[in-house]
Image (cartoon, helix red, strand yellow):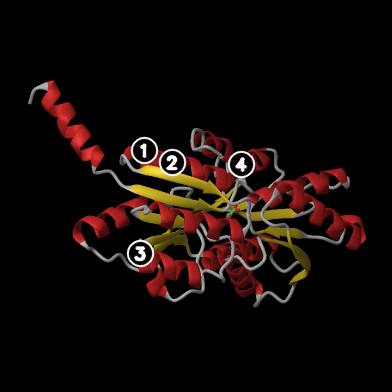
Amino acid sequence: FTLSAMTGLATSVSAASLTVGFSQIGSESGWRAAETTVTKQEAEKRGIDLKFADAQQKQENQIKAIRGFIAQGVDAILIAPVVATGWDAVLKEAKEENIPVILLDREIESPKDLYLTAVTSDQVHEGKVAGDWLVKDIGSKDCKVVELQGTTGSSPAINRKKGFEEAIKAASNIKIVRSQTGDFTRTKGKEVMESFIKAEGGGKDICAVYAHNDDMAVGAIQAIKEAGLKPGTDIKIVSIDAVPDIFQAMAKGEANATVELTPNMAGPAFDALEAYLKDKKEPPKWIQTESKLFTANDDPMKVYESKKGLGY
Ligand code: GZL
């Protein structure tokens, strides 16, 4: 091969590259920011032309962006759906134009023929892993838990609550006494935790916080410290995502456990899309990513270092 022939080959392949629209929820958490970074890296690696739209966590902005992608005639659409309902109409419009849709990191309640596949973790399992850790850590001690829920109506908020409640059901000594959404953000997580502390004897009656993501847990840690209590010892902290900052907190003894969620949903999504478009290979309706428990005993600063460069 001469160099020019090689370059020619390369450009001809990239000329046939795909154009994919990505309707992203927003940047409400460190994990979400990492997912955006990794999705752009995965597209770049494959020579995919990615059209990115940030919805600032509003479903109507996502639907507008999806309609824009359909009008542009993109080859496929990625959606991280902020909530689980209200997608049927716009997904039918994409289907009418034969534009395959892939869901990232959250499920929806629409009929499964309206999307090609969903790349998500098992969020009920995540909640169960978190609850099982707490049951083991607490033993037979009476424990009042406060819960910081994710975005109301989102599949992770619904499923993580369900899984955690399943895990603690048999432990009559462990009770969720307060539960409210912190919308997956640090700011809201801190605000809601402040109200829980006020309502529960200045916080001394609270034994543990279960936060549906690490960002809300980090907000709660701040509120607990400002109330003069020690997060990680006076009040146990268990959450989900495994973002770098939760490992820094663990290293300081201020957090106890997290369930890992990979920000790389796009890799499996693009692989399934290319197999579908090139060889008409139908993927399964669900591509599951794994969930791994990390605690303060797992060398947190080593894990923290390993997560550098992923765009958190
Ligand atoms: C879960 C994902 C959640 C993350 C949060 O799969 O949708 O959204 O756990 C993010 O950090 O806001």
| Residue shown at the point (52%, 39%) measured from the top left | 303
Count neighbours of disc 4 (C-alpha within 10 A) and say few if under 14, some if 14 to 19, many if 20 or more: many
x and y percent of residue 206 in the render?
82, 60
Q: Nearer the viewer, residue 133 or 27?
A: 27
Q: Is mark 4 within 8 Å of ligand 1?
A: no
Query: Which residue has dot 1 on it?
Result: 44
The single residue placed furthest to the top in the displayed view is 3
Measure the alpha-carbon separation of dots 2 and 3.
25 Å
Tell me where residue 179 sits by quadrant. bottom right
Query: Which residue has dot 4 on it?
Result: 247
| Residue shown at the point (65%, 43%) measured from the top left | 250
Q: Nearer the viewer, mark 1 or mark 3?
A: 3
| Label 2 residue SS | helix
- Decide which of tag 1 and tag 3 comes sooner along the chain: 1
Q: Left or right of 86: which side holds 219?
A: right
Residue type, label 2? Lys
Measure the alpha-carbon separation of dots 1 and 4.
29 Å
Residue 70 against residue 165 in the figure, above or below = above
Query: Which residue has dot 2 on it?
Result: 40
Q: Is mark 1 within 8 Å of ligand 1?
A: no
Q: Nearer the viewer, mark 1 or mark 4?
A: 1
Measure the alpha-carbon separation of dots 2 and 4.
25 Å
Are the residues flagged by discs 2 and 1 in contact, CB closer than 8 Å?
A: yes
Q: Which mark is residue 97?
A: 3
x and y percent of residue 253 in the render?
70, 42
| Label 1 residue SS | helix
Q: Nearer the viewer, residue 116 or 135?
A: 116
